[in-house]
Image (tube, grey):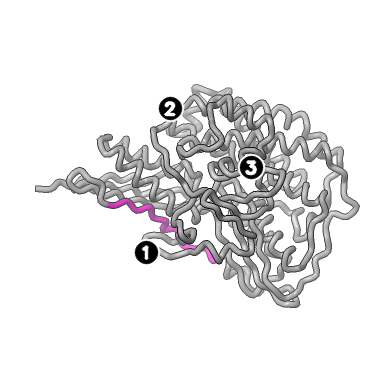
């Protein structure tokens, strides 16, 4: 007579949005794993139709309060492409600099507040702070710095108001940016402390030969521009994305599943950027990675927390480099006159590539929009990770198995939405 065991975790903090997971075990063998996203769609692509092309950055920023720059930068790049304009070097540097602020605040939030408790046996950051107040205070100071960098350039830290197609409404002064230098120098060292701290965690023994996908641009670690490349040999312009990547709807999820032609599931985010662009890291970031025992490629998804800390070091170092070379531009933006056509933009959000396509008419009215966020691109890979992790952990008690599954999902820092966080977790043992 078969026995069915069911586990429910009705509330999962430290992951954004509403999701569920089903694990079915029959006669001691894993039969099925489903990672479900049941949060209702928000229809941003439909909301953009009929709006002016200049409104795209401000509208898409509302998709995420933690990484608004990713959506603003990708949408602006697409509109600049269709208008046939390029940013001046100083404006491009400013766009990269504000993105560094987003990387710092988002990575630190994930590393110290959302993911570290999984490795240390705490329910959350509040419990962690009781024992390691010093580390939590370092993380809060780092996050505050990232927000301040976004505020100085963008006008405010959440949904910046100084960002526009063609550049910015106002360029910061040299003095305003240089005032951030002492804190950024501290942040570079503090980031290295985060690397050392996370490198000491006990990581589950699990690796995969992922198909890594990220941007690549000559001479720099990818953030705000580049071609799309993969560990499987792909090397395409942003415009060619839809020729190689497809989205499909599955009944269990309101987020579309993405696939790479001839490959299937692929991975975007810190592990992919690191593996495909290791040589472009700054010396400080490379040294931090080496001290943490990381090679030039990391295939254990649980170690992504260490790679995020390494990227935090890089973002602080890169911000210092940009500020040292900064000269305030004569004009804060390049004029963009609309013309009928399609434009494509892709940047590296903290969680991976964020791809946008827009079609506008001669008046600049948006006729069509498509946005592919990083979490939807990683969804198939998350499911495959769950199959591998659960399959090797069936001897764990139900509560420990549930925790391991949640930890596996949090490796990706998934942004299901900016709403309340829920996960329904079910295990059926037949």
Disc number at residue 181?
Answer: none
- 340 to 213, vertically: above or below: below
| Mark 2 closeness class: few <14, some 14–19, many ≥20 residues within 10 Å | few
For mark 1, does the 10 Å Cα neighbourhood hold few (<14), some (14 to 19), or many (20 or more) residues?
few
Task: Determine which quarter of the picture holds residue 385.
Answer: top left
Which residue is denoted by mark 2 in the rendering? Answer: 202
In this orientation, does residue 348 appear? yes
Report x, y in % for residue 31.
25, 51
Earlier residue among tags 2 and 3 = 3
Q: Secondary structure at mark 3?
A: helix
Closer to the camera: disc 2 or disc 3?
2
Residue under label 3: 103
The residue depicted at 86 percent of the width and 40 percent of the height is 174
Of mark 2 and mark 1, the one earlier in the sequence is 2
Q: Residue 335 colored magenta?
A: no
Residue 39 is covered by the magenta coloring:
yes
Identify the residue under disc 1.
251
Which secondary structure lies at badge 2? loop
Q: Position of residue 235 (x, y in %)?
A: 60, 55
How far apart in space, not on screen, are marks 1 and 3 (Cα)?
33 Å
Q: Which stretch is magenta?
A: 32-43
Mark closest to the chain's N terminus, 1 or 3 = 3
Work out how far the residue at label 2 is from the one at label 3, CA to CA, in angstroms: 25 Å
Q: Is residue 306 above or below residue 55?
A: above
């Amino acid at each position: 007579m078969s026995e069915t065991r069911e586990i429910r975790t009705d509330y999962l903090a430290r992951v954004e949005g509403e999701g569920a997971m089903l694990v079915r075990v029959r006669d001691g063998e894993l039969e099925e794993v489903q990672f479900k996203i049941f949060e209702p769609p928000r229809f941003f692509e439909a909301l953009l139709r009929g709006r002016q092309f200049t409104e795209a950055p401000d509208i898409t920023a509302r998709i995420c309060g933690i990484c608004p720059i990713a959506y603003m930068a990708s949408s602006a790049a697409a509109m600049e492409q269709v208008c046939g304009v390029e940013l001046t070097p100083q404006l491009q540097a400013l766009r990269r600099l504000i993105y560094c602020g987003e990387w710092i605040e988002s990575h630190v939030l994930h590393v110290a507040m959302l993911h570290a408790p999984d490795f240390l046996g705490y329910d959350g950051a509040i419990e962690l702070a009781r024992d390691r107040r010093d580390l939590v205070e370092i993380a809060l100071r780092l996050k505050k710095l990232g927000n301040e960098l976004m505020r100085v350039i963008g006008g405010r830290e959440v949904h910046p108001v100084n960002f526009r197609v063609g550049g910015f409404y106002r360029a910061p002064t040299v003095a305003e940016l240089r005032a951030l230098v002492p804190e950024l120098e501290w942040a570079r060292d503090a980031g290295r402390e985060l690397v050392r701290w996370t490198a000491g965690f006990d990581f589950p023994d699990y690796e995969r030969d992922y198909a890594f996908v990220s941007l690549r641009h000559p001479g720099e670690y990818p953030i705000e521009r580049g071609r799309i490349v993969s560990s499987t040999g792909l090397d395409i312009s942003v415009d060619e994305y839809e020729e190689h990547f497809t989205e499909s709807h599955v009944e269990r999820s309101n987020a579309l599943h993405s696939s790479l032609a001839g490959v299937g599931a692929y991975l975007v985010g810190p592990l992919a950027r690191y593996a495909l662009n290791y040589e472009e890291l700054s010396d400080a970031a490379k040294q931090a990675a080496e001290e943490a025992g990381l090679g030039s490629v990391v295939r254990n998804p649980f170690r992504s927390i260490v790679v995020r800390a390494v990227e935090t070091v890089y973002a602080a170092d890169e911000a210092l480099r940009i500020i040292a070379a900064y000269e305030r531009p004569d004009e804060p933006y390049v004029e963009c006159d609309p013309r009928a056509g399609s434009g494509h933009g892709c940047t590296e959000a903290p969680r991976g590539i964020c791809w946008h396509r827009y079609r506008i008419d001669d008046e600049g009215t948006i006729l069509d929009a498509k946005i592919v966020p990083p979490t939807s691109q990683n969804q198939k890979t998350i499911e495959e990770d769950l199959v591998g992790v659960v399959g090797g952990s069936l001897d764990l008690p139900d509560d420990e198995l549930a925790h391991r599954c949640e930890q596996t999902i949090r490796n990706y820092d998934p942004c299901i939405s900016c709403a309340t966080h829920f996960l329904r977790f079910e295990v059926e043992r037949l």
